Image (tube, rainbow, N blue to C red):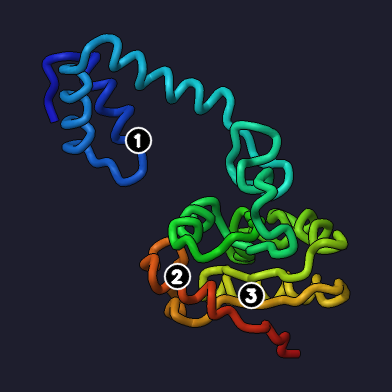
Amino acid sequence: MNFSSKLMEQAVEAFSSLPGIGKKSALRLVLHMVNQSNDDVASFTGALTQLKKHLKSCTECHNLSDEEKCQICSDSMRNQDTICVVESIRDVMAIENTGQFRGLYHVLGGVIRPIEGIGPEQLNIDSLIARAKKADTKEIVMAISPTIEGETTTFYVSKQLSSVDVRISTIARGVSFGGELQYADELTLGRSIVARMPYKIKE
């Protein structure tokens, strides 16, 4: 791709470094930005700067937050006795979009992948155990993607929780095995949350 402007070339390179954005899409975005007013461009870049500067990880659930505790953890109207364990922040958003869950969340930050060097110590499991031991926690919902790695993670976490007095459940299998939670449609995912079932550890 040939450019008449070095500045445009640099901007295209910057946009195309984003996931899912190819050179043609990046060029289209750059041309769009060129035609915007200085105020609009400043507002756009300012939003990104503020995002990078002030966005935090919730100290309670590890979701993204503007404050030390995210809006979900701070919402007294939510069910404080139920924690839904998910792999990623995008899974929180997917479940929230269903409108079928009013408890709290816990983001593990991934799943156990020994081949990639990701073990339990790299995930937010210890903080989950600490939360589960609190007196007001009654149920842990394992909403991990039904992949081999996801099943391994669910099993491991459930074993760690076996000595804690909480009910462990897992989402119903409306989500097909091998699929990722964030890509399930809202109706299927919502029904899976509502129809969750007790999780039994197979020795």
Residue tagged by mark 2?
A: 189
Q: Nearer the viewer, residue 89 or 141?
A: 141
Residue at x-position 21% and y-position 25%: 30
Q: Secondary structure at mark 1?
A: loop
Residue tagged by mark 3?
A: 152
Indicate whether 106 appears above or below 33.
Answer: below
Measured as percent of width and height from the top left, residue 149 is found at 57, 71
Inspect the image, locate mark 2, and give the three-letter code of the amino acid beneath it: Leu
Inspect the image, locate mark 1, and give the three-letter code of the amino acid beneath it: Ser
Q: Nearer the viewer, residue 145 or 119?
A: 145
Measured as percent of width and height from the top left, residue 193 is found at 53, 72
Q: Nearer the viewer, residue 111 or 47?
A: 47
Residue at x-position 69% and y-position 56%: 123
Q: Answer with left or right where residue 164 lies relative to residue 25.
A: right
- Distance between mark 3 and mark 2 Cα atoms: 21 Å
Residue tagged by mark 1?
A: 17
Q: Earlier in the sequence, mark 1 or mark 3?
A: 1
Measured as percent of width and height from the top left, residue 130 is found at 83, 57
Which of the two marks, 3 or 2, is nearer to us in this view? 2
Residue at x-position 39% and y-position 63%: 183
Q: Secondary structure at mark 3?
A: helix
Q: Secondary structure at mark 2?
A: helix
Measured as percent of width and height from the top left, residue 15 is found at 30, 31
